[in-house]
Amino acid sequence: MKNNKIFMEYNKSDIINFLLLMLIAFVLIPVTVKSGYWYSSILIPWLCLALASIGQQIVMGYAGQLALGAAGFMAAGAFACYNLILRVPDIPFFVALVLSGLIAAAFGILFGLPSLRVRGIYLMVATLASQFFIVWMIDKFGWFKNYDSSGIITAQDIVIMGKSFTSPMEMYLVIVFVVTILTLLAVNMARGSTGRNWMAVRDMDIAAESMGISLLRTKLQAFAISAFYCGVAGALFAFTYLKSLEPVAFDIKLSFKILFMVILGGLGTINGAFIGAAFILLFPVLLNSVGNNVFHGAIDATIISSIEQVVFGVLIIVFMIYEPLGMAKLWENLKFKVKNK
Amino acid sequence: MTEFLFFIEVVVAGLLAGTMYSLVALGFVLIYKASSTFNFAQGAMVFFAVLAFVGFMELGLPFFVAFIVTILLMGLVGYCTERMVLKPLMNQSEDTLLMATIGLGFVLEGLAQAAWGVEVRRLDLGIGDFPIQWIIDTFGLFVSALDLTAGLVAAFLIIGLSLLFKYTKMGLGLRAVADDPGAASSIGIPLNNIMLLVWTAAGVVALVAGMMWGARAGVQFALVDLALKALPVLIIGGFSSIPGAIIGGLIIGASEKVLEVYIGPYFGGAIEGWAPYVLAIFFLLYRPEGLFGEKIIRRV
């Protein structure tokens, strides 16, 4: 029964839920949703950003290292993928995707090194270096952009086994496939000894160290895996959502966005990454449609985006005060209440 | 000789630009000293304060009145922050507080833009951003009048604040609170007043910093990103030291300019964007508590 080992720890309802989710993601949505808008403006960016949030979740929610440079690693992944497909003939898309994740992971290890010495805000500043450095590097060295002078490079089509995936629905299926595998992997890591080590380091690193957990290994591992997720997410984000590659798209604002997804979604939870990403992505859409339909454009678009910022800020403060575990915890509470009624 | 003179010029320009970073860093230090909260919103406060100031000026208020009204407004912001953010989060971990202040920063940025719009404003302080003829004649150096003013203002603020902390009753209370808030309030030091004072002082510092930056680069959102550069300054200087903020700012300002001028061309320029952070990382490896910070001892 060795093959079943992964699923041994999960109880029946977990597996049923999982299968149900898969049914929705792979069958129900492709069959029922026909409009390209839903795929290309909501589902695709949601899944990409949720994947990046899982990356941020690993380093911040599980390993407790306050890092603020997810967008930098996403940029590294995106441009690595572009260059791999451009320069390596006949490279399969998924191989390029994994390799670009690994390249991002290498950057993650490099910029995770300061975490061995510092923590908290100090670490945050150190990781900001990765954000600024990676984006600058891609911007300044023409090689990364294939000496394209226009500044905007079109991403190649995704070609898997000779078939190109170009319609929104096809791209969605590719992303769902990748996100499913990586999410399962993340859940398993978080539940296994790897995750336990991360959490021990998060809760008290000195105590963890004296219990024989190698801080060097655990922290760098968290940074590497986090950057891997961000890199893959960045590549998918650029190839399916942005469809063009420009370093500016991966600026510090995106890093903050991902940070907010993790904080609001709930630190130290994988489903929090999905909930947070959905909220941060959908709230502006909702606000815009309220502005257009209720006030008929009487409110300036810049005011709406300012309001959006205020609401995000207020929510962060409110969650920090009343529910530091975020929306994932609210969801748990709701489920608990419904069950015990 | 001209080469050496050019080097001096680069360093001086860097040092003076560094005082601008120091001004932002000073606001961080004030709040960190009083409440060991790292106020990530300081950058947003700079933006908020100077945008409010320009907004009041546009309403037709004279310079001085607008200045006072903005200070009152910053006091109000400080009061609300203390009541609504810091108090409920008392005794929480530093990371939680840090995240809350990130949220606060977003609130302030959003409010400022909602109230006063997003377009870039010009701020004319009556001080030109051009070299002073007198210094060119005497020393052969090109030093901007605005830079020099910023340097003087920073020096004035620091001396003022140091005196305030050292010799007034409020200052003594503040140092007591910084040491141990519980003990301080148990002997009757009014914690709320002290916090209000500190946040207002940080607001004034933010306003002055914003005015200096705004006169140079225009009052715009990019100020928030510029303020991020105060973070490496703090790492070099230490979070709880006022002289540290100044010296850190000078180090970052000078080294950033020197690196940009002498090493930048080999890498295609614009290394100013990340050089301070990398510098800060190397500094962290050598001295994690900063030049003047207190050594952190952690126990299980």
Image (tube, coloured by chain):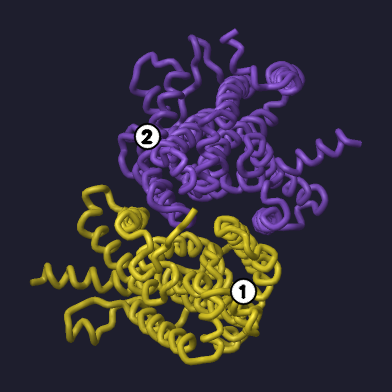
Chain colours: A purple, B yellow
Q: Quick one: A303 or A338, which is closer to the camera?
A: A338
Q: Quadrant of the N terminus of chain A?
A: top right
Q: Is residue A325 left or right of residue B272?
A: right
Q: Is residue A250 visible?
A: no
Seen in the picture, residue B162 relative to A73 is either above or below; the reply is below
The residue wearing badge 2 is: A106
Mark pair 1, 2: CA separation? 46 Å
Q: Is B74 situated left or right of A92 in this image?
A: right
* Amino acid carrying mark 2 in the image: Ala
Q: Which mark is residue B135?
A: none
Residue at 45%, 53% in the rendered image = A119
**Which chain does the numbered disc 1 sit on?**
B
Q: Position of residue A309 (x, y in %)?
A: 65, 56
Point out which mark residue B182 bears.
1
Taking the image as shown, residue B54 lies to the left or right of residue A128, namely right
Secondary structure state at the residue bearing disc 1: helix
Closer to the observer: label 1 or label 2? 1
**Please, which residue is most extreme toward the right here?**
A341
For residue B7, which quarter of the picture?
bottom left
Depth check: give the residue in front, A335 or B147: A335
The answer to which quarter of the image holds residue B79 is: bottom right
Residue A44 x, y percent position in the rendering: 62, 30
- On the same chain, marks 1 and 2? The answer is no
Q: Residue at x 12, y 70 (%)?
A: B4
